[in-house]
Amino acid sequence: MEVKKNVLVSVCCVTYNHEKYIAQAVESFLMQRCNFQIEIIIGEDHSTDNTGQILAYYQKKYPELLKVVRAEANVGSIKNQVLTMKAATGKYIAMCDGDDFWTDPQKLQQQVDFLEAHPEYVICCHYTQVINQTGHTVYLNPRPQSLEFSYEDVLLGRRDETRICSLMIRNTEAVRAIGSTDWYHKTYGSDTFFKLYATNTGQKIYVIPRVMACYRLHTGGIWSMIDPKLRKSRTISDFQLMINHFQYNADQKKALLKIYLQQYLLFNLRYFRFYQTAQIIRSLW
């Protein structure tokens, strides 16, 4: 895919049954004030509510700015993300799910300014306010400070304040190639694998010390409000995929084994997942 020179940032949003939230997300994209051209690409995963109709309104109102990539059938969040990113033509991709939204009109400008000046970073994020279904704040860091993370940090679970709704990434062939890997489509917390894949080249993640987006917890969320047992099970599944498909040195291997023993072993034993336990320990021993 050829990156168009006149579009600097592609805003990529994936959505499914977000009729309560999608307008707020789109309006937060439209309010951005920047000195470059953007495009808005929304992957609509065959919603069964009024999400599609709301997006049709915005597409008609902003035909040169907003494009909706509609699936003919529900393909799931990961494939929807991959298809949406494939349509992106900008040098950078800014990501946000349809149930989250941005709060600062300078967000894109600040992230682009940073990435343009710092080629050693592949991703730029920022702090995020977490709210519940009624709009009340669940989490807000009172003292934001600059953060940076390497591949090793993400591998070992250090990735604070890097939620997808804050993420801007360089739109490179290496980044887009993650969608062609079979294992990526088997993940649950795909954003972690996305960051791992991007930083595997040696580039880093930077977090701007400013709150510029809202992440929403609600019962329809893909990850945030699911049953704790199911979430733990999926987290362990992702952990196993990670150790099977990413490289780590001897020290990192020991650290990963320690994480498994401290955080996941008892859960697997409690639910008689002996085969998975043996596979993971064998990989890390």
Image (spheres, rainbow, N blue to C red):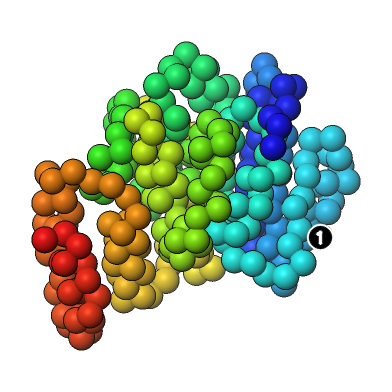
Q: Position of residue 227 (x, y in %)?
A: 38, 75
Image mark count? 1
**Residue 58 versus residue 285 in the image, above or below:** above
Q: Report x, y in % for residue 152.
A: 25, 40
Is residue 233 visible in the rendered image? The answer is yes
Judge whether residue 213 can be spotted in this image: no
Choose top left, top right, bottom left or bottom right for residue 64: top right
Q: In this view, does 77 lie to the left or right of 67?
A: left
Q: Residue 215 at what x, y percent from top left?
A: 48, 49
Question: Label 1 belongs to which residue?
Answer: 53
Q: Name the spot of residue 7 as percent of width and height, x first.
A: 71, 26
Q: Which residue is drawn at 31% across and 30% down?
A: 148
> In the depicted view, which residue is nearer to us: 169 or 38?
169
> Relative to 279, does residue 248 appear above or below in the rendering?
above
Relative to 55, is 202 above or below? above
* Callout 1 secondary element: helix
Q: Which of the two residues, 140 or 252, is positioned nearer the viewer here? A: 252
List the single residue furthest toward the bottom: 272
The structure residue drawn at horizontal position 69% and vertical position 37%, both measured from the top left corner, is 1
284 over 170 or under it: above or below: below
| 12 horizontally vs 168: left or right | right
Q: Quadrant of residue 276?
A: bottom left
Tag 1: amino acid: Gln
